[in-house]
Image (cartoon, rainbow, N blue to C red):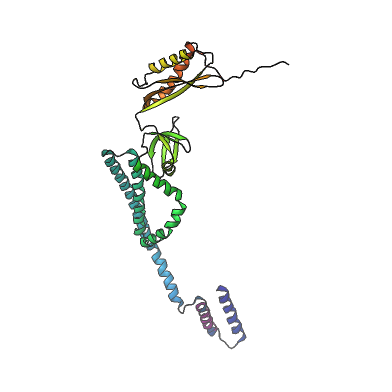
Amino acid sequence: MFNNISAGFVRFFSEAVSENSISEDSVSENVVQQVQTVIAEEIGVDNIDEKVSVIQNYLKEWPDKILRFGIRAGLAILIFIIGCKLISVIRKLLKKSMTKHNFDAGVISFLDSFVKVVLFILLFWGLASYFGIQTTGLVTVFGSAGVAIALAFQGSLSNLIGGLLILILKPFKVGDYIIEHTKDKEGTVIDIKLFHTRLRTTDDKIILLPNGALANSSLTNLNMTPIRRVCLKCGIAYDADIKLAKETIGKVITDCEYTLKDSNVDIYVDELADSAVVIGFRFYVKNEDYWKARWETLENVKISLDKAGVEIPFNQMDVHIKND
């Protein structure tokens, strides 16, 4: 545009120089008219003063617009803070009510996560409406993108449905000790979230298992019954007294404070291995005493067998050399 204006100036002054009969006053008037004509042609308006007036009015209104936007933004931040506080209060009241009515801890955790997500969606929806965004258009967009989102998040949706199935069917609950056979993971259930379940192992590690995998795989819940059987093995030498070993192990089990006195105790020869006769023994304890009973029994069996003179061999191989 500015190149065209410059060309207009050059064209006009060339004509003015070639015509010596033009006076200085007429030259000035013609210059002004020529410049206005060129600018008008390039800008596309007939009245340059009107265009300048529009720009000036816009610049005058700009501070007011900034101020109004700042006020709306400040109110939106205030609404967001108040909304977060209300969501926190609603969640606390909901959890308190469910606890009072003896809801399962897993159900409480799951519903709390679900309500949190829903309430925050409603909060952002309200803020969008406050800023004049057409929410009906958003509904259309989300509806159109629903299929694509479902395909993109198949795993997450599977985990969500799996969480619902776990809460409905209750194969386990918070506090249960479970063993997941697909990945061979085991531990105590800490909580059940929207998409995953958290386990705490015996060495205080946290394992996250997808709810979809838990709902579709086999697992063992060791807390379905109030008692649990401890199954242990111990190898003795081939020349050791088997009866003495069984009596010694039986006394250790009987003297263990965690052994349930009315339960069956099994002591038997489990295997004739390469380097030892393997003695198996089983007894019942309460679920909460399982690990303490296991560790204490293994230690006392070793000490008692040593005192009784029963050898616990290590792996060995006898090599016979034949001379020709």
Chief secondary structure of the magenta portion: helix
Q: Residue at x 45, y 50 (%)?
A: 154
Please provide percent x and percent y for residue 286: 36, 26
Q: Is residue 66 visible?
A: no
Q: Is residue 39 or residue 111 the one in the foreground?
A: 111
Q: Is residue 223 or residue 65 the one in the foreground?
A: 223
Q: Is residue 141 or residue 225 the one in the foreground?
A: 225
**Which of the 4 image quarters holds residue 276?**
top right
Total label count? 0
- Determine whether 48 is above or below 189 in the image: below
Please provide percent x and percent y for residue 320: 66, 17
Q: Is residue 219 or residue 103 the one in the foreground?
A: 219
Please provide percent x and percent y for residue 66: 39, 60
**Which of the 4 image quarters holds residue 130?**
bottom left
* Residue lying at the far bottom of the rendered structure: 21
Q: Is residue 23 located in the magenta-colored stretch of the structure? A: no
Quadrant in the picture for the N terminus? bottom right
Residues rendered magenta in the picture: 27-40
Q: Residue at x 39, y 47 (%)?
A: 161
Q: Residue at x 26, y 38 (%)?
A: 100
Q: Is residue 266 visible?
A: yes
Q: Residue at x 27, y 41 (%)?
A: 97
Please provide percent x and percent y for residue 209: 44, 40
